[in-house]
């Protein structure tokens, strides 16, 4: 039950997501920086639900993921594992091929149907993987504005109604800006209810808005708990510098402490050089907490 919007930029992108959830499920934890990867560690940023999983996240590779429930296929097996562990498992990937291989080797049984959106700026591509409890399929999508919608009432109806709102917003003067994305995700068109982008539906509502902004130098996550239409929300911001795989030799190795308090190595190595590598084994506290 979510709405995800992707906007490409000249050298990066924005990925915004409304998380629609049962109010009784409890509050999630704001984003933090985590270290992932078995061979070489990479910084990743994501908020966490009460089970420790997540619905959106990005890494210093510039790769981001968003996870939606898929209500299209019927349920064939009961849930024994949460979908929330998927993004933390995949987030150290630096290519769509890497994700594809990992997903194809994972045991997904017991996980309810999902759609997983992956954004790969160095490939200039967006991928969507779909799991229907039988098999996983994938689709390559163009590097152009796009929206994904889900609703436990009807994915198709939510997509149809929100698509109309999305199309109308695409004609606005500041289309694609951060302010534009926030207005879109706070929209109640065509009416305040279960199918508006900002959901209000009895015991279910949009419980948070998260945006991942990827630039050539940085990956930034902003998280706003509460309904996007409210003006009194808190704002949590966490960022990490971006790491590029390149054959170009990077500047001489040096170490400093960045604004997050993380150790940053400006290192060099043969073949796959690391320009900026954040080394941290525990979550780093939020950089800013701003009342609005
Ligand atoms: Zn609202």
Image (tube, rainbow, N blue to C red):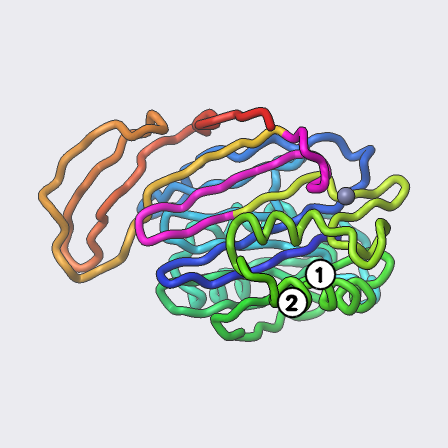
Most distant residue in the right direction: 202
Q: Image quadrant of residue 245?
A: bottom left
The image shows residue 224 at horizontal and vertical percentages of 61, 36
Is 242 on the left-hand or right-hand side of 19?
A: left
In the rendered image of this protein, does residue 89 appear above or below residue 289?
Answer: below
Query: Nearest the camera: 162 or 189?
Result: 189
- The residue drawn where x is 18% and y is 32% is 255
Quadrant where ligand 1 appears: top right
Tell which residue pokes out farthest to the left in this image.
252
| Residue 82 shows up from this direction | no
Q: Decide: few, some or many residues near mark 2? Use Cα within 10 Å; few <14, some 14-19, many ≥20.
A: some
Q: Identify the disc placed on residue 130.
A: 2
Which percent across, then down, holds residue 51? Answer: 67, 35
Looking at marks 1 and 2 on the same chain, the residue that comes earlier in the sequence is marked by 2
Q: Which residue is found at the position 66% from the left and 70% from the top?
A: 135
Q: Residue at x 11, y 47 (%)?
A: 251
Nearer to the camera, 219 or 282: 219
Quarter holding the C terminus is: top right
Secondary element type, mark 2: strand
Task: Give the image quarter of residue 12.
Answer: bottom left
* Magenta residues, start to end: 212-233
Residue on which disc 1 sits: 149
């Amino acid at each position: 039950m979510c709405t995800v919007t992707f906007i490409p930029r000249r050298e990066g992108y924005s990925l915004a997501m409304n998380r629609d959830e049962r109010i009784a499920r409890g509050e999630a934890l704001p984003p933090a920086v985590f270290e992932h990867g078995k061979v070489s560690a990479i910084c990743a940023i994501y908020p966490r639900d009460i089970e420790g999983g997540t619905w959106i996240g990005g890494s210093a590779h510039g790769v981001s993921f968003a996870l939606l429930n898929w209500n299209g296929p019927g349920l064939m097996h009961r849930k024994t594992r949460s979908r929330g562990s998927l993004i933390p498992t995949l987030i150290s990937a630096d290519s769509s091929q890497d994700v594809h291989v990992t997903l194809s080797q994972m045991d997904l049984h017991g996980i309810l149907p999902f759609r997983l959106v992956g954004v790969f700026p160095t490939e200039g591509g967006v991928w969507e993987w779909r799991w229907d409890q039988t098999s996983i399929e994938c689709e390559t999508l163009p590097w152009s504005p796009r929206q994904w919608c889900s609703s436990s009432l009807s994915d198709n109806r939510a997509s149809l109604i929100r698509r109309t709102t999305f199309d109308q917003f695409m004609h606005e003067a500041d289309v694609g800006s951060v302010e534009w994305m926030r207005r879109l995700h706070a929209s109640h068109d065509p009416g305040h209810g279960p199918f508006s982008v900002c959901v209000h539906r009895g015991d279910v509502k949009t419980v948070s808005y998260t945006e991942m902004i990827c630039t050539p130098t940085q990956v930034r996550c902003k998280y706003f708990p509460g309904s996007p239409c409210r003006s009194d929300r808190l704002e949590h911001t966490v960022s990490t510098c971006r790491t590029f795989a390149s054959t170009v030799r990077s500047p001489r190795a040096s170490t400093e402490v960045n604004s997050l308090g993380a150790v940053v190595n400006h290192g060099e190595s043969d073949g796959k050089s690391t320009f900026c590598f954040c080394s941290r084994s525990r979550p780093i506290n939020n950089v800013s907490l701003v009342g609005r």
